[in-house]
Image: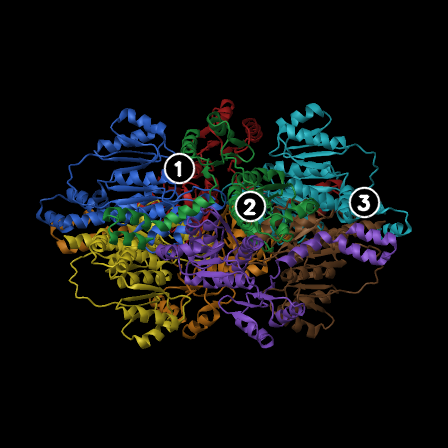
Chain colours: A brown, B green, C purple, D cyan, E orange, F blue, G yellow, H red
Amino acid sequence: MMEEILEQVQRGSLSVAEAKEKLATYENLGFAKVDHHRKNRQGFPEVIYGEGKTDVQILSIIKAIRSKGNDVLVTRISKDKADYILQEYPEFIYNETAQILFWKEQKNSKDSFQGYIAIVCAGTSDLRVAEEAAVTAQALGSEVRRFYDVGVAGIHRLLDNIEEIQQATVSVVVAGMEGALPSVVGGLVSHPIIAVPTSVGYGANFNGLSALLTMLNSCASGISVVNIDNGFGAAYNAVLIDNLAKKGAEKG
Amino acid sequence: MMEEILEQVQRGSLSVAEAKEKLATYENLGFAKVDHHRKNRQGFPEVIYGEGKTDVQILSIIKAIRSKGNDVLVTRISKDKADYILQEYPEFIYNETAQILFWKEQKNSKDSFQGYIAIVCAGTSDLRVAEEAAVTAQALGSEVRRFYDVGVAGIHRLLDNIEEIQQATVSVVVAGMEGALPSVVGGLVSHPIIAVPTSVGYGANFNGLSALLTMLNSCASGISVVNIDNGFGAAYNAVLIDNLAKKGAEKG
Amino acid sequence: MMEEILEQVQRGSLSVAEAKEKLATYENLGFAKVDHHRKNRQGFPEVIYGEGKTDVQILSIIKAIRSKGNDVLVTRISKDKADYILQEYPEFIYNETAQILFWKEQKNSKDSFQGYIAIVCAGTSDLRVAEEAAVTAQALGSEVRRFYDVGVAGIHRLLDNIEEIQQATVSVVVAGMEGALPSVVGGLVSHPIIAVPTSVGYGANFNGLSALLTMLNSCASGISVVNIDNGFGAAYNAVLIDNLAKKGAEKG
Amino acid sequence: MMEEILEQVQRGSLSVAEAKEKLATYENLGFAKVDHHRKNRQGFPEVIYGEGKTDVQILSIIKAIRSKGNDVLVTRISKDKADYILQEYPEFIYNETAQILFWKEQKNSKDSFQGYIAIVCAGTSDLRVAEEAAVTAQALGSEVRRFYDVGVAGIHRLLDNIEEIQQATVSVVVAGMEGALPSVVGGLVSHPIIAVPTSVGYGANFNGLSALLTMLNSCASGISVVNIDNGFGAAYNAVLIDNLAKKGAEKG
Amino acid sequence: MMEEILEQVQRGSLSVAEAKEKLATYENLGFAKVDHHRKNRQGFPEVIYGEGKTDVQILSIIKAIRSKGNDVLVTRISKDKADYILQEYPEFIYNETAQILFWKEQKNSKDSFQGYIAIVCAGTSDLRVAEEAAVTAQALGSEVRRFYDVGVAGIHRLLDNIEEIQQATVSVVVAGMEGALPSVVGGLVSHPIIAVPTSVGYGANFNGLSALLTMLNSCASGISVVNIDNGFGAAYNAVLIDNLAKKGAEKG
Amino acid sequence: MMEEILEQVQRGSLSVAEAKEKLATYENLGFAKVDHHRKNRQGFPEVIYGEGKTDVQILSIIKAIRSKGNDVLVTRISKDKADYILQEYPEFIYNETAQILFWKEQKNSKDSFQGYIAIVCAGTSDLRVAEEAAVTAQALGSEVRRFYDVGVAGIHRLLDNIEEIQQATVSVVVAGMEGALPSVVGGLVSHPIIAVPTSVGYGANFNGLSALLTMLNSCASGISVVNIDNGFGAAYNAVLIDNLAKKGAEKG
Amino acid sequence: MMEEILEQVQRGSLSVAEAKEKLATYENLGFAKVDHHRKNRQGFPEVIYGEGKTDVQILSIIKAIRSKGNDVLVTRISKDKADYILQEYPEFIYNETAQILFWKEQKNSKDSFQGYIAIVCAGTSDLRVAEEAAVTAQALGSEVRRFYDVGVAGIHRLLDNIEEIQQATVSVVVAGMEGALPSVVGGLVSHPIIAVPTSVGYGANFNGLSALLTMLNSCASGISVVNIDNGFGAAYNAVLIDNLAKKGAEKG
Amino acid sequence: MMEEILEQVQRGSLSVAEAKEKLATYENLGFAKVDHHRKNRQGFPEVIYGEGKTDVQILSIIKAIRSKGNDVLVTRISKDKADYILQEYPEFIYNETAQILFWKEQKNSKDSFQGYIAIVCAGTSDLRVAEEAAVTAQALGSEVRRFYDVGVAGIHRLLDNIEEIQQATVSVVVAGMEGALPSVVGGLVSHPIIAVPTSVGYGANFNGLSALLTMLNSCASGISVVNIDNGFGAAYNAVLIDNLAKKGAEKG
């Protein structure tokens, strides 16, 4: 591309000023490529972290996003703030457990890909984080199946569901307290696992530190970990992986 | 008892000096009872913590114990030191993995009690601690069954053995790294579990802190925890519990 | 049992569909046994952790439990929520200090067993946790004796009660601040001790970490530890142990 | 499958004893499937963690693996021990920096898949961990490209290589000290990143804790983390992901 | 000076009492010099830490300062308290984001010095701390340029501004979460960097500990660190450095 | 004093130069007084911290001290180094357990004071620290009585000695592992207690942190704490207190 | 005494029942002595820790204490609760800064003792803790002098007061943030120092941990430390020491 | 510059290929500028971190540097390795305490600048780190004055030197144990202070954490902190600041 510009200058079909501007763009091409890559990801809606932003601030960001015709994903947004947005955009979907508000253009995609992400969750008290992961993954375009309340203290509940979990492309495994679930799942499946420690617990739980250390030290292979309570981050990772499988399948 | 002594004084059948001595004994009776209780425990050999003691020091303590005819249990004793002791007491038994040296008088007890302690162990690298627990429990007079290398990353190995574990009186569950095994066992058995975190691992394991926190935060009921690598302490607890069941049974 | 089913199929006395259903049950027998074990435990009421559940949610769980005729135990439930439940079930018992609501079918058991659990408590500020343990143990069917405000800074208060503590089957020892009480009790009794650190204290207490570490490092034998403030867990352990002694005694 | 067996019994074409054995197998099928999944993974060599095992122990495990015709991967094995193995198996490959010994059957696979894993490394002192990841990934069958010494303090070195990193299927990013590299890479690529903190550093580095926390708190999306110095675990994750992309591509 | 006083005493031109008082002053001269140095610094307004002081208390301190004709700088002061002060001193300037209230005498300084402090900030959520630094530096008399929202996850935003940052005398770099920004800036500039970790984040961020450790472990040279959220302290340091450059330039 | 000098100058009996020199001394009098106070303390030997110093270095410091006729106290000095010193100063006393070398001038003091410092020690493994305290206190001139191996797990051993401990002026209480001894002693005596945590223990002891936190959180009044293993510091404090009592008594 | 009782029994001047009761008392003499010691301390009022107690509870405890004619000291009591008590006992003194309520019988003691406790305080924000110490010491009967706002960042303020501090019997030194003040004071005085870290600060202060570690690691001798914010405990220690000096002086 | 190239292309005085190459260079100009800035710094020798490198590796790096005529600075290099280098380069200077080897071209600079860096050090055991700072600063071209053994426990030693410290451009203050020295110095000088915590100490010092926290929490303004033991980093910062003052002065 640089060569082309220079030849146009040589031929006189491009002024120095015009060439300079184009090359300035080119000059940033490394980063433009980055953006281009980002474009490819999208289909991904732009993500707004709702915590610490006012409803007015969130609304104005959403307007800017929608003006470009893009999808919207707001995480960690309370019902109050979501209601405020929904007055303007009643077509948006709000999931109160997940604390997520999103909107996604419907596409007539005949998606032949059969893959799905398994969202596996130890206890009912980890639901908020599990749902943040599940709804995020759906908003980012992946199929999701939920396997909730299958914690290690009642291992048969997990085993009753293990075949369906095994057939997922990737699992997001959410657990608080002792955080042992990813290790057990990791010994039963052959796909990648994104483990999410939650801050659920008390005493020597230290706001999720216990579960975090458990997951980092897992003796099962194929497990990587995200920050405490970071359901969004886990889903984001899972969707990247799910898309790799999808892309391969689509090429076929 | 005090009353009796005083009446003897009143009757003149006991001098003041004699009464004084007896009462002095009585005065310490609270603690004498303690010792009496300790006696009941025994059959328990006296326990020597070998780390940081020289072979000469250990030998002299053993001689004192043996001179009273008591059993001997030395924990955390290296092979070198044990060999030194074995020259004098070739009848002693040394278990190198457990780092335990002990001697126990054979009794013709027709013990009708069927109970046993299950020593359950996550990985081969936790063997030293598991064996410290197992040999301690045996030296203290309990029946022991070992279930080793049944960590959560291969849950079927545990499930293959679960019925025999379920029939134990009490389990000692030893695990390093993420320390999830007690939680899983706790969901499958109905007897008390003594959990032992080990310092096996690396990185964010922090010398056993990870496993310790996991066990303290277990979502399964019926689990209590001892210090990192404290196989001896876990076995001691387990034997106390096993003896309670045994005593009941013997009374029957 | 599997053999029997197959023979019935062979004989034609059982259809394939009927056999399949029975075997499906059988197939899960490993875990069914678990449940069976759990049944044996019961007599134990089912336990509901009240924190983070609404009164409506708790009520609906209770109804489900009562519909099966089972006993009820709700821990960490505030007076407000308990009052809501008591309107429907005025026969339930609420202990505000313990934050426990429970109901237990009266049985005409002529329980010849003399054992009891000692609940030993360092200071008045540890009362909530001690009562959680005491009431839990009672709700789970054990006899309980309370020894409160016998902290180590006034050792004679403990010694005044030590004989009665010594005769318990098992002790639950609750202490905050420096958490030294279990070590002292551990040197005076010969039965198992479940130690409960509490988050009572300030400054370098770090929400109970100080007491937790103290108890894990105890130089007395026969002590195991549960999570900070986990009075319920300690009682659950103690009852398991008490039942072992009881069972033996009953056999007799 | 169960139905089929029962019908055979009904028809008399299967004896009760034969049916019992088959059902016994079936009963464990959940776990058999697990193993089947594991088989699919393989091609993966079985992995031996060399630390804490003697050369004799390692050799005997290798012999067992080779007797089944399987590939071999030994991690954390010192040169001394590797030399001992190489006397018996001179065809094995030892990488001293990575501390890995492995052997892999050559296959005439015409692998049309173009994907590769990028191993990105902050500093020369993180080489051991980066090489553990790189050699593991190769031993597990993935293509690998190395981008070493591209730490954030000289950001242009990273930018000079960013396009080739962007085209990888997945990146393993290794960094010690402040551990900032994954965040920067995460902002420049659109594929999943497995971040590996290393224990390289001094002072307030606290044996890798600093880098670990940095990576868990990364503000870039698409990053998940493994334990400190766990190059093997990161590579294992990366290969699972790489295989998902490969599998899709192969199907095409 | 001491000599002079003594000679006056010798000559009789100074009484013993007068000499004693003068020498007492002299005796404290070391500290008087300290104060003198402090005077030199000023131009620096006196600084009031507003947190934990009532509006009435702050007002009375301000009055004392103003009565000496000095400038005023109040940090960590809420809008409510500031409004109270502004009623009395409407000429004061309040910056709500920075939580700073200040007043500075206008001087007709023809300041030929071209230097400025770059305030560089990773994310919008770090704004409060960045503004505390920026407004402090301005109130203390330095030129400031702001470079906000240039976090490492979008490195091109930083690179777009890097030349202007490079020409600053000194940079204050503010970052929360993983705190990687100072390392990247440190690799791109040749002047001193004062790094400020913020408590922005969640989970394993531990109230800013993560960012603090990152900055202390930075592999880039020329970085020193202040306490978490201490925007004021960073600015104070930066102004001291900026003044050194200014002083040199002014001498010229 | 200043007045006097000035009057001498006024009178001409002191030259300006002479006065200047005297006043220069006077000018530093605040600090001179400090030294004067230090003198009063002494009789205290000067203290050399032996760790990290060579035998040659220690010898040369000792020579300087002895040249002024002062007493000598070297702490944390190994036997090897002590032997080197003893060749030159055979009259010095070396205590190997305490790792202390000292020399003290004999005085014919008819010390009517009856007070003593109680050195109380939990376990035999804390001996090194207890002896460091005991020998330091003796070297600094106090009477010392040792009460060793009276840990809380065998409370009667402590109670057997409690009266003699109660009559001390001040107690130094040394304990590792759970560090509970000072709390128990604190409840039984009415004089000040200096508590010394030791690094003896393993697992969750964290090199003495456990004992340190226990002591800081003690529910008994009258306890203050020094650094882990700091037997010297505890003794120094105790001697200061003992001297206050002695001084009062001597005045009488 | 035991002998005497026995002789009376022998002589018949004491019945067995009477002797038994007397001996029961004697039997507890070890602890009675403890109480006796406690009596000696008193003059010390009994201390009530107000935090977590209701005004009604505090009042009832006070009534019990007053009914025995004893002095009263309530720490950590809010103004609301204090006002409630003051309605009943208007003669009590409440210090709001110190959060202390106390009452002390006036005695016509002609106390010839000149000693006092120096309460030294780094910053105005440490006032609450310093006043807790000061008022406690006064309520316990010691003379107190306050030296406030003499933190190390303005060392001349400390030096201006150092002589008066040097003449105290013992110092309580209170400091938050970096907690350096006790080290500096420790280098300037020759009496014991009780150091109190406070939780004042932010960021890497970690609720007083920073100041606590500073004080424990002080390179000055003669310093011991109490828990974070424990002004009461420091004063209690200081008064014990002050009384030792006083007692000596009184004997004289 | 880009414009110029384009005009040459337009004029035909530069071929497209030549222009492309030149622009490629230009394209990286942002980073080229960075390097240019780095050049300006230099005069700074290139820095080699010697720890973990062999003598052979260090020598080969040095040869590369010397071949470009540049100065050399090797930190953390042991005497053994330094001796190896000195055989080849006998003109190099090795400072064993500082563990630094360097070489610097002599310049006939008539440096009129009077500024110097004060290296202030609390105790003799911090010497290694202080010397690392001092020698680094000298090797980087700054004047240095050393003020050693002026710790806060003997504040008069510091005050005796304070005037000379006050006149420095910038101070590097090194302290271990409680790390209080920078706070005291910070209250006495008006220039920037770079504080260096050292790992000197024991017990609750936690390898320098204590001193690090102290310095971060300093109540004195004008202090920033580098990593534990990072004398090099502190000096590097100080030289950057010193050069700013120098540059100003030179311009004059």
Which mark is in front, 3 or 1?
Answer: 3
Separation of residues labelled 2 and 3 (CA atoms): 38 Å
Residue that mark 2 sits on: B196
Frontmost residue, H93 versus G10: G10
- Element under label 1? helix
When the figure is inspected, residue G93 is found, relative to residue F140, above or below; the finding is below
When the figure is inspected, residue D162 is found, relative to residue H50, above or below; the finding is below
Residue type, label 1:
Leu
- E148 left or right of F143 in image: right
State whether residue C40 appears in this view. yes
Residue type, label 2:
Val
- F36 left or right of H78 in image: left
Frontmost residue, F122 versus G6: G6
- Element under label 2? strand
- Element under label 3? helix
Label 1 resides on the chain identified as H
- C56 left or right of H98 in image: right
Residue D90 appears at what percent x and percent y?
A: 72, 24
Pointer 3: residues within 10 angstroms few (<14), some, or many (20+)? Answer: few
**Residue D21 shows which numbered tag?**
3
Pointer 2: residues within 10 angstroms few (<14), some, or many (20+)? Answer: many
Residue C36 position by quadrant: bottom right
- H103 left or right of F21 in image: right
Separation of residues labelled 3 and 1 (CA atoms): 77 Å
Residue E227 appears at what percent x and percent y?
A: 47, 53
Label 2 resides on the chain identified as B
Residue F131 position by quadrant: top left
Residue that mark 1 sits on: H127
When the figure is inspected, residue E218 is found, relative to residue F93, above or below; the finding is below
